[in-house]
Amino acid sequence: MRVVSALRKAMLATALVLAALPARAETLADAMVAAYRHSALLDQNRALLRAADEDVAVSMAALRPIVQWAASHNFQRTDGVESVQTTAQLVAQMTLYDWGRNQLAIDIAKENVLATRESLIAVEQDVLLTAVQAYLDVRSAEQQVALQENSVNVLGQERQAAQDRFDVGEITSTDVALAEAQLAATRAGLAAAQGALEIARENYRTAVGRSPGDLASPPPLPKRPESVEAAQASARGTHPVVRQAQRAAAAAELQVAAAATERMPTVTGSAGLSATRQPQATRGALGLATGVEANNSATLSASIQMQQTLYSGGRLPAAHRRAMASRDASRATLLNSARQVSQAVGTAWANIDVARAQIRAINEQISAAQQAYEGVREEATLGARTTLDVLDAEQDLLEARADAITAEANLQLAHYQLLAAMGVLTAKDLKLGIPTYDPSAYYNAVRDAPYTSRQGENLDRVLRAIGKD
């Protein structure tokens, strides 16, 4: 009993300690993890990838025989004579040689799978970058609201001070009106900031999948490469858009070869087994029907056939030229993608430098504006400054602090935009510490076009794992 009592006391003490601890603030990593798990856009593109995986299975199946069965039952009556025939057939057909046409189709499907995987990575980057921007927007909006609320309080005091000085005859009613006008403008700014905060929270809910709680300060800024040239060179080799364009260009090259093989002959083999049952009436000496005999027959057949299109009305040459034009377009797309990625890296790099320079200048501006505001207020109490001077100084300080909030958020966002431009803004590269989607699991289960086997069981397991069975 004493042990149980001591255990209860320990549990109660632990519960009290846990209740006293402050709730953990939500970090930027938490937001990105939630966005990764919540995104319907990722689910959509994962399904598209699985569809591309199935194209490999479809192409693989073209190398295998096709087995079909057919059954027919025919009835015929001619000049009072009836005949009935029942036939069952089993036919197997297979392409024996097609000059590599089916193998090219498999290779094209595989390249399309790899391209779709890169597209999925690009979507993942967009999802995570959207979550980062939503997180930073909420934090900035909250800081802007707090700044505007503080300004309303300060201007309220200024307005009261102006009223007190007017009551003793030190200033005119014009000064009081100026203070009231500035206070009303700041209240309007507060309302706008509160509206912007609600919008930012809605964007956060859409991007992350839940309402924002107490958001922690962003983590230390990600480290940049040594130079913008190094970042651009890395991006051209790792960015999913470039890699997707590379795969698409490879598939287009294979399409040209596949179009050329369409002019070649095709050798197919077939084998069949058919069974026929046809009842026939038996007749006696007077020609009268005396019974029915069944005439059964079985036929086994096999054949090899070669066929080739000699004239297609220009369709095959046009298809070949079309494939070559598509290949040229894919090459140009690859070149353009590399240029766009380099531009995005350069833009993000410049935005980082601009934000850093702005923050340094704004900090100096805030320090000077704070000194000016305090000096003007002191001089106003001595009658050397007007109320308008005080209000102007306070407004300059408010704008400088608001600019500082925006510049800090821009610096954070520019760093993550640089990671996205380099192709490394993924759950794996960021080391978010969560299980990520394995694009090869489904592919490995279906690439050999399983019907029933251990591979089929593996496919069932994969489908259950992703909740699509």
Image (spheres, rainbow, N blue to C red):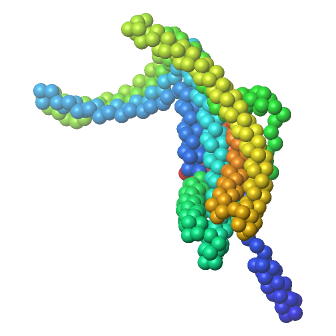
Up-down: is 397 above or below 332? below
Residue 78 in the image, given as x and y percentages of width and height: 15, 27
Residue 321 shows in this picture: yes
Up-down: is 381 above or below 344? below
User: Quadrant of the rendered structure where residue 291 is?
Assistant: top left
Residue lying at the far front of the rendered structure: 169
**How many circles with numbers are drawn on the protein?**
0
Residue 341 in the image, given as x and y percentages of width and height: 67, 30
User: Quadrant of the rendered structure where residue 173 is?
Assistant: bottom right
Q: Nearer the viewer, residue 7 or 294?
A: 7
Q: Nearer the viewer, residue 253 or 450?
A: 253
Q: Nearer the viewer, residue 350 or 130?
A: 350
Q: Residue at x 74, y 64 (%)?
A: 379
Q: Residue at x 66, y 59 (%)?
A: 389
Residue lying at the far top of the rendered structure: 310
Residue 403 in the image, given as x and y percentages of width and height: 68, 51
Up-down: is 230 above or below 320? below
Q: Nearer the viewer, residue 337 or 254?
A: 337
Q: Residue at x 56, y 35 (%)?
A: 52
User: Quadrant of the rendered structure where residue 164 is?
Assistant: bottom right
Residue lying at the far bottom of the rendered structure: 1
